[in-house]
């Protein structure tokens, strides 16, 4: 099979899988997400095929420090949504294994009971190590779920810190999960989480320090600059199912607020900016890696080492090489 024939076969396969996905075929959706993760050319093909079919889903981001109980919370949200006959897809972003470089599938195991229902689709994906907590492929996977007709998409991140704030760009509603006695986490809130969170969840609120944590949050919310939306605070004990219904109601309240104030379109545009930035950055990084193996790059390093060229001059040349066709 020559290169042209192979390309046509791949394009035909992508078109057939997309047609099945659009028709509600769960197996096709799973295969498409797998191809998005593993095959850059396939990702281009599916992106073009799926682009006209999105824009209907509502995305909820669940983030917070590791161990805060995010996965248990998501499992509870799934049960609550099912009780209201809602259909929900979940992308659980897992840390990349240093040994296998694959996703650790703990989130899927914790959500197993709800995931057995046909109205739920759960997929674990590797989180990217670029610092934002979201894989470059995550926006493409969200678009695939949207095109497949899932009205609610929940994205659970690995964790959150001062630089791991991409979820706010991907989600229409961002839920930040904290535990009582948060200690140093207050610094993260001051550094950026106040701008990220639409809803704060104090999980494991039966523990000591819950009232102090709520008081700290209320004080920080009161000190933050005025905004059209004031973050809500919900107390939960996720492993007992307490407060989950209230959290689902709060998500609905935030959604209705955005729809009534025309903010939802703004959020969706931020999502598109995230997707574009990630793909462009990925392309530039790949081209830089290729250039770093060239004689020209070795010569550049020599000039840097001898002091004949500055770092800024070299960086400008490196970027110019990366942006060449």
Image (tube, helix red, strand yellow):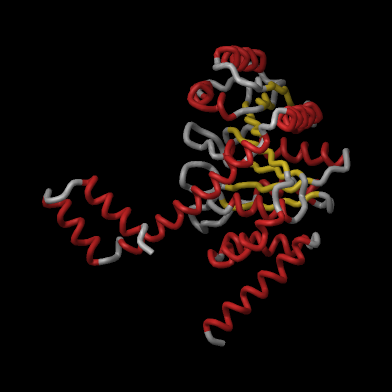
Q: Residue 70: x and y, percent? A: 66, 36
Q: Is residue 39 above or below residue 161?
A: below
Which residue sits at x=75%, y=62%?
21
Query: Which residue: 58% across, 83% down?
Result: 5
Q: Is residue 258 above or below residue 212?
A: below
Image-quadrant location for residue 182:
top right
Rendered location of residue 138, percent (x, y): 59, 50
Q: Position of residue 226 (x, y in %)?
A: 58, 16
Front one among 39 and 18 = 18
Rendering quarter of residue 259: top right
Number of marks in the rendered image? 0
Asked whether 8 or 202 is in front, the reply is 8
Q: Nearer the viewer, residue 236 or 302?
A: 302
Can residue 240 be seen in the rendering of this structure? no
Q: In which quadrant of the rendered image does the N terminus lie? A: bottom right
Q: Is residue 145 left or right of residue 37?
A: right
Q: Is residue 98 above or below residue 243?
A: below
- Is residue 139 in sight in this rendering? yes
Q: Quadrant of residue 219?
A: top right
Task: Name the spot of residue 306 as percent of width and height, x first.
Answer: 11, 52
Q: Nearer the viewer, residue 124 or 241?
A: 124
Rendered residue at 61%/47% (across/down): 93
Q: Quadrant of the C terminus?
A: bottom left
- The relative height of residue 200 versus residue 139 in the rendered view (above or below) is above
Which residue, as the protein is rendered here, is positioned at the far front? Answer: 262
Residue at image position (88%, 43%) is 85
């Amino acid at each position: 099979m020559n290169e042209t024939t192979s390309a046509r076969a791949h394009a035909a396969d992508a078109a057939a899988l997309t047609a099945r996905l659009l028709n509600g075929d769960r197996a096709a959706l799973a295969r498409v997400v797998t191809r998005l993760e593993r095959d850059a050319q396939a990702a281009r093909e599916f992106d073009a095929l799926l682009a006209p079919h999105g824009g209907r889903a509502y995305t909820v981001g669940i983030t917070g420090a590791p161990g805060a109980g995010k996965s248990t919370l998501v499992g509870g949200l799934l049960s609550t949504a099912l009780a209201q006959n809602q259909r929900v897809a979940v992308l659980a972003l897992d840390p990349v294994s240093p040994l296998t470089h694959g996703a650790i599938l703990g989130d899927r195991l914790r959500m197993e009971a709800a995931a057995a229902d046909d109205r739920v689709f759960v997929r674990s994906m590797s989180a990217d190590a670029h610092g934002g907590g979201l894989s470059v492929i995550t926006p493409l996977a969200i678009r695939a779920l949207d095109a497949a007709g899932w009205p609610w998409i929940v994205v659970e991140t690995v964790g959150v810190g001062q630089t791991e704030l991409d979820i706010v760009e991907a989600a229409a509603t961002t839920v930040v999960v904290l535990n009582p006695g948060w200690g140093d986490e207050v610094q993260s809130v001051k550094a950026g989480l106040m701008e990220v969170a639409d809803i704060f969840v104090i999980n494991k609120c039966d523990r000591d320090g819950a009232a102090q944590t709520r008081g700290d949050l209320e004080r920080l919310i009161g000190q933050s600059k005025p905004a059209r939306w004031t973050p809500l605070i919900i107390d939960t004990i996720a492993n007992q199912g307490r407060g989950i219904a209230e959290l689902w109601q709060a998500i609905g309240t935030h959604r209705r607020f955005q729809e009534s104030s025309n903010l939802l379109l703004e959020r969706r545009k931020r999502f598109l900016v995230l997707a574009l930035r990630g793909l462009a950055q990925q392309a530039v990084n790949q081209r830089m890696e290729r250039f770093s193996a060239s004689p020209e790059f070795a010569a550049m390093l020599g000039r840097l080492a001898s002091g004949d060229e500055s770092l800024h001059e070299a960086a400008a040349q490196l970027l110019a090489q990366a942006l060449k066709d």
